[in-house]
């Protein structure tokens, strides 16, 4: 917190930081139904013509407000940008509540770029999370803080060769996926999630996306190991080249390995 | 003999149409019935006695965030109420006693693209269905509230979308849309099996590569073009067709990276209920750059058009125009305004095309009416077969809007500009409720309101029209004259949907009271005093006083 205060003091002395705050606010905080132009109110509260404690503004801007529409900007804006926008909000304290200045024109703010992944890794990441496909990897596998962790953690594949990774994707999963038989006559490939408080929770993998079923033990005929379930239906239309892209992405996230992966490396020819 | 037979046949025919079209004892679904009339054939409460209504019970949900925007439903004397953060209560509809509750475990990291409110649940086959704040669909046991299945429609953190609308259940399918029209996202409508939760079909509201209509999007813009499906659709059982309104293209105000008509945004879509295949579409606003969704209710009516009975669908859009379209063919029939201050176009030609588009400009402020909040909000209108009129609200307000060039970032806000509300040039901003001929738009009466009316409207066979206002007044108007017959101060602004139902021969009128929502949040730009309007979340239920227990049998 002391560091933040020091930074705050520095940025207060810097008029250029103020105008940056105005731009950042226009691009991120005025949008849509949120805080309105120059803090004139929206779905979010009015910010102009009100007095906020700076430390509070910093905390809320950085960390968001849980269970509200206010997001955490940490990670989306740099520390300097958060400071600049807080300074701007503080400056609105003496503004008339209902009479904002005209909106500033948006400008692109350059952000520092981390070491960029290769274009193949980027293609693989885009495909992994391509929600415009009817089925895509990220809906069942979390990677890099994204996606939904239904299936196994793919970072465990870090030390595997591309051919081994592809083989793991293509093979049947009898040790993981069971077959659930329900007393109403239905049966489905299932991942057992939990057996708690007298309830059995199963993920039904029949269709995409998987369905979390909560059943009473009395509703279940049996849960037999070894389902004949594979990724096959979800891999339709994924050729060797695209598989190589996916593998390059998985290896990069799992092990920081940025070596290219060729279609031949996948063993799919 | 012959004439008696004909009369009986006609009576039976009318009876069955009426049963399909109106609610009776129950209020079983979001729109009352699948044709979205919001009309009940109950008439115990009528224009002659509505001024005697008294409170029967109230239910406090304890969840005031974001406003109480629900439409309660009633099935077999039990009411199902949803609140913000996806809490569901099953309540004895006669007494208000809680039977069970279900609190959805909403994640704590809900961010900017999400909205906590919920607009209702659906019931069918012993199950209650709800879409969630983090874009899941859940099925609950109707008797106990126990969760039966739960499916993640799409990762809400990735899509910048979620579900606030009530699902529509058709033939064992739970059909639900998503929000996300103001995010970089590709919209869709999905049908799930009511018993298992398995996905049965999905209709993408933006055609992908190789599909007809894909050519109406420039470059990669189809991937991030919005086209949300954020309200509840309708169903015609005879045609087996689902009708749904599709929202705006993204970015809302900036269209230079998506040149083209941008199908099927701002369109009514007609889908085969079994397959989700498109039968026809009607696009109301090609290449929208105003955020004027066509996402609101699709009201299904069989009405005489120039002497011939036509099956039509009526949809009021956010631009403030009602569109009437043949629901078998998708042919345009008529279009008419629900607000006076509409400067984004000069009007419609006789084929429904927009005249003289007045578009926002990049980096330059422009005065345009209505505001982004719409010539009407999502709160639903109502059709009464007794008057033959459609009752809907309208809003008079404008904005200074500035478009900004913006690049899509998947799942992030994608507005492409900013706005500031302004009063309309014709005088004071405000709202109104009006009675219209649904085909011609001829207006029969107007009820004026200081603030926009943001609650849905209910009509009954008692010739009473109910709605509520932002100051908390819940009120009844005469369906034929608009005369105010009764009001009740509910203590917080009305942003949900009133319903009516009957238990053991007694008719009730129920309404949610609880101020809040995105549009409620921008009102202070025009009406600063609304900033301090109190939130709340209480369901009020009214009925006529019980007769005094003096005469014999009633006392036993």
Image: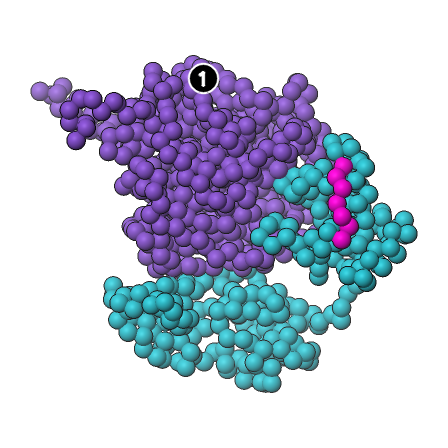
Chain colours: A cyan, B purple
Is A266 part of what is drawn in magenta? no
Q: Is residue B111 left or right of residue A103?
A: left
Q: Is residue B534 left or right of residue B259?
A: left
* Location of residue B460 in the rendering, given as x and y in whole percent from the top left corner: 35, 25
**Residue sitting at x 34%, y 18%:** B49
**Residue sitting at x 26%, y 67%:** A218
Q: Chain of mark 1?
A: B
* Location of residue B174 in the rendering, given as x and y in whole percent from the top left corner: 38, 50
Seen from the viewer's position, the closer of residues B406 and B454 is B454
Q: Quadrant of the N terminus of chain A?
A: bottom right
Snapshot quadrant of residue B439 = top left
Can you identify the residue that label 1 sits on? B484
* Location of residue A73 in the rendering, given as x and y in whole percent from the top left corner: 70, 56
**Residue sitting at x 54%, y 54%:** B208
**Residue sitting at x 44%, y 69%:** A233
Circle 1 — which element?
strand
Snapshot quadrant of residue B121 = top left
Seen from the viewer's position, the closer of residues B253 and B309 is B253
Snapshot quadrant of residue B452 = top right
Seen from the viewer's position, the closer of residues A11 and A81 is A11
- Main secondary-structure element of the magenta-colored stretch: loop
* Location of residue A234 in the rendering, given as x and y in whole percent from the top left corner: 47, 68
* Residue B286 can be seen, yes or no: no
Q: Please provide the residue range marked out in magenta.
A: A49-55
Other-residue count near label 1 (Cα within 10 Å), few / some / many at <14 / 14–19 / ≥20: some
Residue B238 vertical placement versus B88 (above, below): above
């Amino acid at each position: 917190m002391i560091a933040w205060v020091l930074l705050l003091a520095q940025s207060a002395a810097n008029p250029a930081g103020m105008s940056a705050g105005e731009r950042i606010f226009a691009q991120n905080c005025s949008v849509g139904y949120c805080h309105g132009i120059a803090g004139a109110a929206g779905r979010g509260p009015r910010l102009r013509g009100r007095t906020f404690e700076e430390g509070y503004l910093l905390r809320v801007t950085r960390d968001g407000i849980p269970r509200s529409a206010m997001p955490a900007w940490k990670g989306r804006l740099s520390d300097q940008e958060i400071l600049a926008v807080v300074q701007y909000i503080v400056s609105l304290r003496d503004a008339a509540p209902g009479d904002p200045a005209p909106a500033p024109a948006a400008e692109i703010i350059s952000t520092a770029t981390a070491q960029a992944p290769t274009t193949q890794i980027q293609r693989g990441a885009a495909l992994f999370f391509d929600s415009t496909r009817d089925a895509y990897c990220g809906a069942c596998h979390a990677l890099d803080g994204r996606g939904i962790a239904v299936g196994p953690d793919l970072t465990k594949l870090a030390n595997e060769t591309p051919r081994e990774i592809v083989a793991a994707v293509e093979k049947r999963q009898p040790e993981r996926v069971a077959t659930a038989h329900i007393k109403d006559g239905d049966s489905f490939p299932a991942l057992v999630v939990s057996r708690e408080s007298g309830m059995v929770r199963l993920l039904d993998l029949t269709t995409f996306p998987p369905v979390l079923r909560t059943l009473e033990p009395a509703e279940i005929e049996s849960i037999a190991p070894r389902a004949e379930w594979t990724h096959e239906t979800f891999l339709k239309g994924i050729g060797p080249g695209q598989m190589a892209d996916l593998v390059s992405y998985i290896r990069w996230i799992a092990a920081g390995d940025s070596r290219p992966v060729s279609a031949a490396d996948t063993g799919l020819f | 003999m012959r004439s008696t037979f004909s009369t009986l046949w006609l009576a039976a025919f009318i009876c069955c149409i009426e049963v399909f079209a109106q609610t009776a004892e129950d209020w079983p679904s979001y729109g009352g019935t699948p044709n979205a009339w919001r009309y009940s054939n109950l008439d115990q409460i009528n224009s002659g006695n509505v001024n005697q209504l008294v409170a029967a019970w109230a239910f406090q949900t304890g969840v005031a965030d974001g406003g109480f925007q629900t439409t309660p439903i009633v099935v077999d004397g039990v009411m199902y109420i949803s609140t913000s953060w996806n809490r569901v209560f099953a309540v004895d509809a006669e007494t208000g006693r809680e039977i069970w509750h279900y609190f959805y475990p909403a994640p704590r990291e809900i961010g900017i693209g999400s909205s906590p409110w919920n607009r209702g649940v659906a019931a069918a086959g012993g199950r209650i269905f709800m879409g969630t704040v983090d874009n899941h669909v859940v099925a609950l046991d109707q008797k106990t509230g126990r969760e039966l299945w739960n499916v993640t429609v799409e990762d809400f953190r990735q899509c910048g979308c979620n579900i606030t609308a009530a699902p529509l259940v058709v033939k064992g399918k739970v059909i639900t849309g998503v929000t996300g029209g103001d995010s970089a996202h590709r919209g869709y409508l999905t049908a799930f099996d009511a018993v298992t939760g398995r996905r049965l079909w999905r209709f993408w509201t933006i055609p992908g590569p190789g599909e007809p209509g894909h050519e109406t999007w420039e470059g990669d813009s189809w991937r991030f073009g919005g086209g949300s499906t954020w309200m509840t659709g309708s169903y015609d059982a005879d045609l087996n067709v689902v009708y749904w309104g599709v929202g705006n293209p993204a970015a809302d105000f900036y269209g230079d990276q998506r040149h083209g008509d941008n199908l099927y945004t701002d369109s009514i879509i007609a889908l085969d209920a079994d397959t989700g295949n498109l039968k026809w579409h009607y696009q109301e606003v090609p290449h929208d750059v105003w955020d004027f969704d066509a996402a609101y209710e699709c009201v299904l009516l069989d009405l005489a058009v120039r002497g011939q009975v036509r099956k039509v669908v009526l949809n009021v859009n956010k631009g403030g125009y009602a569109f009437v379209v043949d629901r078998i063919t998708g042919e345009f029939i008529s279009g008419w305004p629900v607000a006076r201050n509409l400067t984004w176009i000069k009007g419609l030609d006789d084929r429904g095309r927009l005249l003289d588009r007045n578009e926002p400009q990049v980096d330059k402020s422009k005065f345009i009416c209505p505001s982004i909040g719409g010539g009407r909000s999502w709160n639903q209108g109502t059709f009464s077969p007794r008057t033959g009129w459609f009752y809907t609200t309208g809003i008079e307000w404008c904005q200074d809007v500035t478009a900004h060039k913006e690049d899509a970032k998947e799942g992030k806000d994608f507005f492409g500009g900013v706005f500031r509300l302004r009063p309309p040039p014709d005088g004071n901003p405000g709202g109104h409720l009006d009675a219209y001929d649904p085909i011609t738009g001829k207006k029969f009466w107007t009820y004026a309101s200081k603030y926009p009316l943001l609650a849905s409207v209910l009509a009954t066979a008692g010739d009473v029209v109910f709605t509520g206002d932002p100051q908390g007044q819940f009120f009844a108007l005469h369906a034929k004259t608009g005369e105010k017959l009764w009001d009740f101060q509910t203590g917080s602004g009305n942003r949900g949907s009133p319903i009516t139902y009957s238990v053991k021969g007694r008719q009730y009128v129920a309404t949610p009271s609880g101020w809040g929502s995105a549009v409620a949040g921008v009102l202070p730009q025009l009406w600063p005093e609304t900033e301090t309007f109190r939130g709340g979340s209480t369901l009020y239920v009214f009925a006529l006083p019980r007769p005094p227990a003096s005469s014999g049998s009633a006392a036993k």
